[in-house]
Structures are given as C-alpha cells and as structure tokens.
Image (cartoon, grey):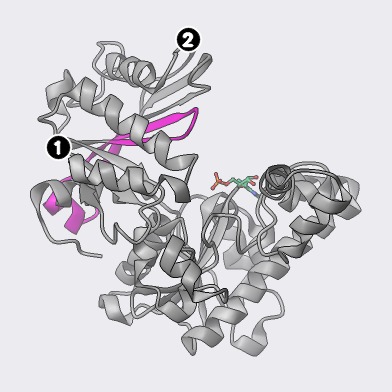
Amino acid sequence: MNIFVLNCGSSSLKWQIIDTDLEMIKDDSDKMLAKGLVERVGSQSLITYEVVGGKKVKMTEALRDHKAALNHVIKWITSAEAKIPGINDLSDIAAVGHRGVHGAERFKRSAKIDKEVIAGIEDCIPLAPLHNPANLKGIYAAQEIFGPSLPQAVVFDTSFHSTMPEETYLYAVPYQLYRRFKIRKYGFHGTSHRFIAYRYRKLNDLERDQVNVITLHLGNGCSACAVKNGQSLDTSMGLTPLEGLMMGTRSGDIDPTVIEFLVHNEGISVEEAFNLLNKRSGLLGISGLTNDMRELIDEEREHQDRRATLAIDMFCNRVKKYIGAYIAEMNGADAICFTGGIGENSVEIRKRACQDLEALGIKIDIKLNEQAVCGKEMKISTEDSKVAIYVIPTNEELLIARDTLRVVLNAPRVW
Ligand code: AMP
C-alpha cells in the first residue's frame, strides 16, 4: 500500500511516498518511492522533488499556502513526468500519515484522524504555538485534496516519551503548575528515538523489554533518550525543544536567570531573549560562525579557529554529561546509538563524544568509527567495550508510514 507521509512546518512541506504492508514490515522490505520538499510556502516557493532511482527536479513557483503547496505536489506525483512506480492517480494512495509535533498528555499513541483528534491537536496549541497549527494546516489541506474518505493518521513526536515516570517528567516547581497548566517535560524526536531503539532490537534479536540503550539524535536539533526495558525513561528535551543538549542554534540547558538578566541588562523583551536562546545560541552562538557542524569541523581543521573548537568541545561535553547521567539513571546501559545528521555522519564528533569514557565501560573503535559514514547500521565499539556503540541512521518517515498503516488497518503496533 502506498502511504503518503506529510511533514508540515510553518512555511515548509516535506513529503514521501512509502510502499508498505504488514508483510513488508516484517522483513523490512518496505521502501520509499519518492520524496520532496517545498520551502518558503507563502511566497516564491523553492521546490525539490525526487523519484528514487530516477528524476530529481527543482523549480520555483508562488504557492500561497499549504493547500496550494500540497496541490502542487499531488499534480506532480500523478503526472506522467514523475513516473513513480505504482502511482498513476490519487486512488493509488491508500492513506496519509502526518508528522505531529506536540501531542501533550493526550496522545500516547499514533491516532487515526477524526474530528476529536483534530480538536485534541488544537487543544495542544498553547504548548506548541508554532508547530501544531502547521500540522493542522497539513491535515486540513490533505482532507480537502484527498477527500474525506481517505484515511489519515497522525504520529506524534512526543508519544514515545509518554512512558516517562513522574519523577523524570516533572520540573521541581510548584506542583500546582503541573496541575493547572500541564507544565512538564514532554520530550521530542520521539519517532526517531523509537525507530533507533527498534532497529537496535532487530539487529540484536531481542524482545522489546530487553532493550536498554541511550539513543542520541544529533542533528540541527539534538536530544538524548534513556530507553529502559524498551520504553522512554527520560529524555533531554523538555516542555519545548529548547532544553537539553547544545544544538545548532539552541542553547540547551541553561539557568533561567539568564533570561531575567538579559531582560534587565540588555533591554530586550522576554520574547527576544527566548529568540536569542532558540535561534542565535548553540553552535552558532559560541562559534560566531555557523550552526552547521560540518563547517565548524572544517574551520577547526583548516584554520584552527579557536571558537569553532570551543563550540565543538562544548557540544561533545554536553553529550558526555547526558550519557553519564542516563547510565546512572538506568543503572547501566547496553549500548549508545548515534543518529541524526551529525550522529550518522560525523566521525569526529562520535570520537570526541565517546573519548575518555572508559570509566563507564565505553570504548570506541577508531577504525570502525571511520568506516561508519555511508548511511549503514554499524557497531563501532571495541570488542571489550562493556557498553556497545552503534551508528543507526534514523528514518522517521518510515515509522510514520508503518504506524499509519497499522492505525488504518487497526493492526497492533510492534513497537
Ligand atoms: P539534521 O538536522 O539531522 O539534518 O542534521 C544537520 C546537521 O548534521 C548539520 O549540523 C550538518 O552539518 C551535520 N552534518 C551532516 N553531515 C555531516 C558530516 N559529514 N560531518 C559533520 N556534520 C555533518
């Protein structure tokens, strides 16, 4: 069955078509057929579409909103020009799966979209004022374009973390604030952490409750997750994605007094202070150069830029701190799994983040680490490392497609 996976941001629309069914899921033979990205929705949009093993096209066109963008995508995928195997018209799409960002406490699982689910996503808007309205735009556009009879599902970034116990998800602030406003840690990147934990389980032929790993999603956004007995026990992002690891432009953990200090001493508003912590901090803020890890590593190597090195060292140090904290919280982990653009591709960052962790039983194999760059799943720890280290490429879209299929067929979730 062809599942159309849709990931709508405030001004972007990413899509994939994935061919999957219950048998294909069992033997991991389900596959992506085509994908694309529309950026700058609302103005002169930049459009990239690609059919696997075939055409890649780039174009620009004025697309005024998400509905216009989705219409553009649909017109292209059903055109003779695209030639996507098995896709001739809209009836070849069996269901639509949406990436949902914030499901708060309401959505512990992926859900089939109906009026109630839409109302639930709307209720979560105060917790995700940028992301949830974008998700809703995608859902409305898909309902209009595909028609009301095509099943649609939503897979939330927060759901995997719904197993966190109170002592890890609560902030040490007056308990009434949790009661009144549901202020707590929710965590994000859940679909990625779940996928990585699932792949680790498959690679090692384990039962779900035997999975005790620390998953590290290191991309432009970064988060760590302590997966104990197959469930999220703790994760580094919080009420919003600002908390936790140092990221491309986000500060990660910080003393909140910094905000008060900035408001009083820099004369900026609270909103501007948060903008600074979200958009101008992290790797970009420290290096003063870029939020792109690849560029920082090049700067360090080619120009010995001191602040590029500082940004990289701070980034790796924060990763180490979370590894240590989660090993303690989990009473030991069997493996650390790297994923995301940096985690999957950067030999240097994996090396520096795992360096000098022998006391915790973590030893990286320098040669294997250097080989793990081609999007392959690989173990990169030494034979005698007590904690294994893996590189596992993430595939959130595949998990969204699989969950959508299961939700639509009412089949049990494997993970
Ligand atoms: P993502 O958000 O998962 O797409 O990851 C984006 C981040 O991955 C950016 O900081 C990129 O610079 C980084 N990245 C991608 N490839 C490499 C690489 N070969 N070495 C270092 N960083 C990389």
Residue 131: say if magenta: no
Res 132 quadrant in image:
top left
Label 1 residue near ligand 1, CB within 8 Å: no
What mark, if any, has residue 61 been given in the picture?
A: 2
- The answer to whether residue 352 is visible is no
The answer, for residue 22, to whether it is visible in the render is: yes
Quick check: marks 1 and 2 in contact, CB under 8 Å? Answer: no
Q: Position of residue 57 (x, y in %)?
A: 44, 17
Label 2 lies in ligand 1 vicinity (Cβ under 8 Å)? no
Amino acid bearing label 1: Pro
Residue pictured at 26% horizontal, 65% vertical: 415
Q: Is residue 97 left or right of residue 223?
A: left
From the image, tell me which residue sits under label 1: 151
Residue drawn at (31%, 16%) of the image: 71
Report the residue at 38% width, 55% height from top: 191
Which structural element holds mark 2? strand
Left or right for 269, reference 359: right
Q: Which residues are magenta?
A: 5-33
Give the x, y percent position of residue 382: 56, 78
Q: Earlier in the sequence, mark 1 or mark 2?
A: 2
Examine the rendered structure and indicate whether residue 296 appears above or below residue 169.
Answer: above
Number of numbered labels in the structure image: 2
With respect to residue 2, does 108 lie above or below? Answer: below
Amino acid type of the residue tagged 2 in the rendering: Glu
Q: Does residue 309 appear to the left or right of 63 in the view shown?
A: right
288 versus 310 height, above or below = above
